[in-house]
Amino acid sequence: MDTSKILAFRHPSQAGLLLESWVQTLDRVPGHASRVSVASDLPAVLQRMTIRGAKEKLGWAAWRKDNAIWFFTAQLVSAPLANVRRPGVKISGYDEKGRLTETGVWVDVPRRGWQRCAL
């Protein structure tokens, strides 16, 4: 996905699209996990995160399998990669209790895929 013009918009829907691509490309959730598309289907702690995230222009995506939930937020950022600033996505992952499980800035480089940036 070409991210070169996305930073100009900085809308949560663009961050959400990039997040979906990142999750699918890097297999971040189990194959049979179900997509959660409505915030009210999430635990209360994650529902609050979606509300707070909307104010901060964060996109979000979540998946559920049995009692486990994979919840991610995404924000468009300018990211350093190979000494060049590029449009990137700051992605944070949380478990079903709202505990941070991972965070990082990623850039989708044409013909090379998702690359993690040093912070």
Image (cartoon, helix red, strand yellow):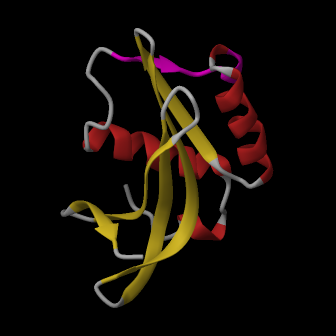
**Looking at the image, which residue is at 31% across and 65% down?**
116
Q: Is 17 placed above or below 41 here?
A: below
Q: Is residue 33 left or right of residue 97?
A: left
Q: Is 113 placed above or below 66 here?
A: below
How many numbered dots are placed on residues in this image? Answer: 0
Q: Is 26 placed above or below 37 here?
A: below
The x and y percentages for residue 39 are 68, 23
The x and y percentages for residue 88 are 46, 67
Q: Is residue 8 left or right of residue 55?
A: left
Q: Does the magenta segment cover residue 44? A: no
Q: Is residue 40 left or right of residue 64?
A: right
> Camera-side residue: 96 or 12?
96
Say which quadrant the C terminus sits in. Answer: bottom left
**Looking at the image, which residue is at 40% across and 8% down?**
66
The x and y percentages for residue 18 are 46, 50
Q: Quadrant of residue 26?
A: top left
Residue lying farthest left? 112
Q: Quadrant of residue 75?
A: bottom right
> Camera-side residue: 43 or 9?
43
Say which quadrant the N terminus sits in. Answer: bottom left
> Camera-side residue: 55 or 68?
68
Residue lying farthest bottom? 83
Q: Over which residues does the magenta segment extend?
A: 33-40
The x and y percentages for residue 72 are 51, 40
